[in-house]
Amino acid sequence: MGRMTYAEASILALREEMRRDPRVWALGEDIGRGGIGGQYKGLQDEFGAQRICDTPISESTIMGVGVGAALAGTRPVIELRITDFALCSTDEIVNQAAKVRYMLGGQARAPLVVRQPNGMCAGFAAQHSQSTEAWWIHTPGLVVVAPSTPRDNRALLKAAIRSDDPVIYLEHKEMWGVDGEVPDAEETIELGKARVAREGRDLTIVTWSKTASFAEEAARTLAGEGIEAEVVDLRTLYPWDRDCVIASVERTGRLLVAQESVEIGGFGAEIVADVTQHAFGALKAPPARIGAPRTPVPYSQPLEEIVRVDAPKIAAAARRVAAARRG
Amino acid sequence: MGRMTYAEASILALREEMRRDPRVWALGEDIGRGGIGGQYKGLQDEFGAQRICDTPISESTIMGVGVGAALAGTRPVIELRITDFALCSTDEIVNQAAKVRYMLGGQARAPLVVRQPNGMCAGFAAQHSQSTEAWWIHTPGLVVVAPSTPRDNRALLKAAIRSDDPVIYLEHKEMWGVDGEVPDAEETIELGKARVAREGRDLTIVTWSKTASFAEEAARTLAGEGIEAEVVDLRTLYPWDRDCVIASVERTGRLLVAQESVEIGGFGAEIVADVTQHAFGALKAPPARIGAPRTPVPYSQPLEEIVRVDAPKIAAAARRVAAARRG
Amino acid sequence: MTPAANLPEEVEHGLARYRTMLTIRYFEETVCAAAVAGRIRGPVHPYIGEEAIATGVCAALRRDDYVASTHRGHGHAIGKGADPAAMMLELYGRVGGLCGGKGGSMHVADFSIGMLGANGVIGDGVTMSLGAIQGSRLLGRDVVAAAFIGDGGMNRGPVLEALNWAKTFRLPVLFVCEDNRYSASTHSRSVTAGPGFTARAAGFGLPAEMVDGNDVIEVERAARTMVEQLRAGAGPMFLHALTYRIGGHLAQDAAPYRPKEELARRSPLDPLTRIETWLAHHGIETHTLEAERAAVRESIATAERAAQAADFPPAASVFADIQDIGAPQWGA
Amino acid sequence: MTPAANLPEEVEHGLARYRTMLTIRYFEETVCAAAVAGRIRGPVHPYIGEEAIATGVCAALRRDDYVASTHRGHGHAIGKGADPAAMMLELYGRVGGLCGGKGGSMHVADFSIGMLGANGVIGDGVTMSLGAIQGSRLLGRDVVAAAFIGDGGMNRGPVLEALNWAKTFRLPVLFVCEDNRYSASTHSRSVTAGPGFTARAAGFGLPAEMVDGNDVIEVERAARTMVEQLRAGAGPMFLHALTYRIGGHLAQDAAPYRPKEELARRSPLDPLTRIETWLAHHGIETHTLEAERAAVRESIATAERAAQAADFPPAASVFADIQDIGAPQWGA
Ligand SMILES: Cc1ncc(C[n+]2csc(CCOP(=O)(O)OP(=O)(O)O)c2C)c(N)n1
Ligand SMILES: Cc1ncc(C[n+]2csc(CCOP(=O)(O)OP(=O)(O)O)c2C)c(N)n1
Ligand SMILES: [Mg+2]
Ligand SMILES: [Mg+2]
């Protein structure tokens, strides 16, 4: 067990997978010298420019090439820099990667990983601070993963690379430098399984990615007030671990989904709607969501803080949920 | 009052607006000879090739040009043929059209309409049968409209063109030939207001676009069984008419959202989650959704029928909602 | 119809190309009629008039080389060697179709012969073909790809990006622009700038040649030369094949927007007429050509009858081959 | 610093350009220091070393002409006439910023002078500039646009589409490629194919010229000639301006990936040195140049002090200017 950053953990994962499987390679803009978060540092030295491939600024083709290369039997890791630029290759993700297996009747598959760092990045403003998980959740054919710790980033990236399904892999833009314990031994995490980050009897907070740490922080604050929140970090957003969430809500009777992204039409809506439909009887209070207002992300710091979902905002929402009664 | 098709109603709307306001124009592939649904027929003859502008097959630029032209003081109607191809200009829609007003601090606006016919089209398979409304709902800055009748298509398109906000305008791919009554007199419909298509006391069916007609058909069937369903056709999907929906649910105590699009992560999740949060006490049964499975749209007819949400499926879901008890 | 054993190789090849072109032509005529009659659903984009391009280019490829196609993909599939009967089943949405009936006309594909699929999105086949090659290179395979694209598609960003990309990585990809003069009902020239596609390709460093795309012999000659060079490591090349879309954009499109004189001028240039003339010139007799036509026509008719008689796919297949984890009916 | 009234017009213009370039240089040096120190947040892409391009091109434009910029947009804004003090407020995220503090460095814009904005997405400014022109034409305005794009950005599909589009509609747009040799840490040449950007533009029918982008006099001359032609209806043109990014990609980037010899070779070519030499050659004395520098430096320092002292925007502004209907906090 050693400490390393979220970025280093992903380097480790990719290095391990590239050593294990010669079909694994990565492509994207400017990754040869390390990439936007340093998450490819040193890899080109070991694996060369063919397997850590610097590309032109051609997002459509980056993604199209990734799909073609997957169809031809390799396992590309496609780096899109940030999810905001993935909007330049939405067509190739949705119309090709996600569907090709289905529409070709299963004669081919696209085992690829699309890395597109997600979420807010302090001071990066409207075009560099988006979250897009809600879109990929809605898209048949895609698996969606969002690691919340260095350890998970190593183990989930490895699982994503080994998956035969196309995986949208959402690292968080602000987490590259966050460090944590990572086991020395190789490790993967089964896709589709959540992690109960903290147990509690009073309400269930479902969350993912960077917001998981805010939710844990909120839970610690709440514990001091006598409210015991259970925190479920989904890890995989599709398929999300409904069994785990519903079991928790059946115990606590209360649900809060905490997400960084825009609340309206966000992934939290799916969780609330699904849990409401399938565990209505267990609910002691209306299930709630806390997410960003439907606002582009502003540049100025105090404005940015307003739209950022942080631990105090989660704690406040959790207090309301804990206090609410069945209407 | 005369009868005309959904396509003709939209031609009428665009003609009226182009006559009224010289700043209104349309651009897109192959529209000079009428467009994919005949929805531009005859307009180039009247307004010329500058105002009904045939473009190269360059989706990114079509959308980018639309944004720039709106910023320069015109009111472009941007035709993207089908929503599936809008995936080729998602960046320009989301990163530019939706945000430009905000991130430039209000010094400019983008009053444009993006027409992108939505939904399934019989036999068109996975890349031509998608629904994308869930994405636009989630995107700050966008108004989203989905007309369900010829009359609404005329009145809502006019309202969309007059709106100073960017509007995603989702006609339905299978409706061009559907006809209905359209008043002779000019008419607009206020954006953000729903239409109660049918009144009923037993449950509320919230729906939009082509599915509204299936919901009405289902309601007629149910009426024969003694179940009176209220059908709310949202018309505008963002901002959706929450007051109307909640008032209805407060009367009926039961909610079913019926949508053609993939259920998981769809717009219906937002409605269910929102209504649950804000009218929990009024609910006599778990709110429910009926939508497509998370499946690319298959080509073969019997398979396509399986994933299509039609009147019998809505009726079946409504029966379950009507029979369910608060858990 | 095996030709007499003593034909010169050149003529034997010509006859083989003729057979391929006939197969495409009759396949298209048959499926267009079926589409107009409503037996085949969805959009069908006939390749009628353009047969020489797919036939000539694919003849220059190995079985394991790749082809990436467009929305107008039947010709490319047949050219690469796909079974017309399995294609017919696909267009009829039946069991045994190339894609199990789940793809239809815009997705005919056969990975066993490197046919990566028709594609409903203009240009995406092109970028995917680059990836197939880049991936294959990593696996140590010496395959090449032919990426077909329409004249209208030459204005899509991804296609233009692909020219730069292919040259940057020196990928053995032959871009083939099928210039049938139209993008749906738009005359492509009216929305296309510059001195021509060969100059456009040259602007990205690709050697480029223009050929008469209705002359299968010429197309094959040009394609062969280029494919040899690309397999030898010369980097990507560009073939601009001039042709004409004899039919409408879709089976149902009567194309009233086309000037009559244009059609009249075009008819004698039909690629089938051209190869028939060539074969006649090389000593093939009329009755041999007639016999070829009858044989192909009959095999396509048989394929259609079989498709009409075939079963639809089982209901369960709607949920197969989506993804390994994440059941599609969740939340239903 | 008004120059002596009796200077020849040419020299007076040279001095004015020098002042603009100094403004850009000192603005960038100041905001880079502030970014490194953490006073300014988010990405700052300095235009240091490229000042001659924005200055020369914008000098050839009218006030109501458009400029579409890139992520590296400060120079274009200043060149077009934006107030550096209001830009400074914007980068500090304060009230009075060009965008009310809501945009920051990557969105500096001033519509009152046709500056359509820096842009966080490479290439989108280019397509938007075409629309601004197409819209203006509809409104009967005879404006032109300059669309700036980096050497790396020349490989993005939308930019390539735009070349075709602009020529198709004969739009008076001057494409200006600022070739600073780098795309972030990548040497652009390593991912860029073809004989060069002028050939690439010519492939789409655009008259194209290459200039020394560090020579403001030459840039302005070339831009003026082209802008005159485009305003007269000649259709779009392409200017390939060679330059060098003296600093890093971002304020914080020390650019260790650049060979030392390259930097050494480049330093004497600094566009400010070049215009100083030119001015000296035209009789401007050293103390005049020094006075210019001091004055500009002082005005930028004043702007920074003012920005640091200014208020942050009121909380309510976070929900302003999103859309007219649909309250942002719904569901909260
Ligand atoms: C990205 C995209 N945009 C638009 C379309 C709709 N579309 C289908 S075919 C066609 C015309 C294509 O013209 P061309 O590339 O010349 O090919 P052709 O049909 O002539 O073979 C268009 C616009 C599409 N399928 N994909
Ligand atoms: C569509 C898109 N892709 C990637 C990026 C990330 N990015 C920002 S600047 C940059 C390099 C740009 O190089 P160039 O166009 O030469 O401009 P320069 O920075 O040299 O001025 C990249 C890749 C982006 N902003 N937008
Ligand atoms: Mg064509
Ligand atoms: Mg550069």
Image (cartoon, coloured by chain):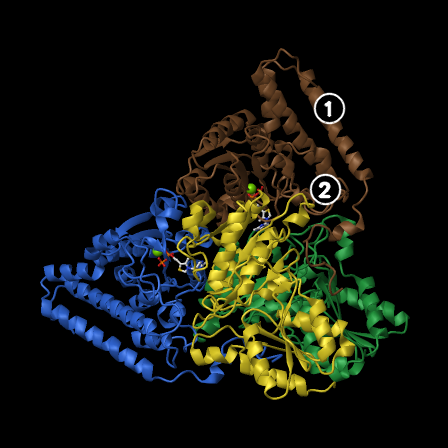
Chain colours: A yellow, B green, C brown, D blue
Amino acid type at image mark 1 = Ala
Residue receiving disc 1 = C295
Please provide percent x and percent y for residue A237.
Answer: 63, 65
Which mark sits nearer the N-terminus, 2 or 1?
2
Distance (Cα) linking label 2 and label 1: 22 Å
State the residue in front, A62 or B18: A62
Q: Quadrant of ligand 2?
A: bottom left
Q: Pointer 1 indicates a residue of which chain?
A: C
Amino acid type at image mark 2 = Leu
The image quadrant that residue D264 belongs to is bottom left
Q: Are marks 2 and 1 on the same chain?
A: yes
Task: Please give the name of the residue rendered at 36% of the width and 56% of the height, measured from the top-left corner.
Answer: D185
The image quadrant that residue D195 belongs to is top left
Q: Pointer 2 indicates a residue of which chain?
A: C
Q: Quadrant of the N terminus of chain D?
A: bottom left
Which dot marks residue C91?
A: 2
Task: Please give the name of the residue rendered at 73% of the width and 74% of the height, measured from the top-left corner.
Answer: A276
State the residue in front, D150 or D166: D150
Please provide percent x and percent y for residue B317.
Answer: 81, 67
Task: Please give the name of the residue rendered at 76% of the width and 61% of the height, measured from the top-left corner.
Answer: B309
Which residue is farthest right? B225
Task: Please give the name of the residue rendered at 49% of the width and 73% of the height, measured from the top-left corner.
Answer: A297
Q: Are marks 2 and 1 in contact (CB under 8 Å)?
A: no
In-image side of D51 versus C171 (left or right): left
User: Can the viewer see residue D68 in this picture?
Assistant: yes
The image quadrant that residue C201 belongs to is top left
In-image side of C306 versus C63 (left or right): right
Q: Quadrant of the C terminus of chain D?
A: bottom right
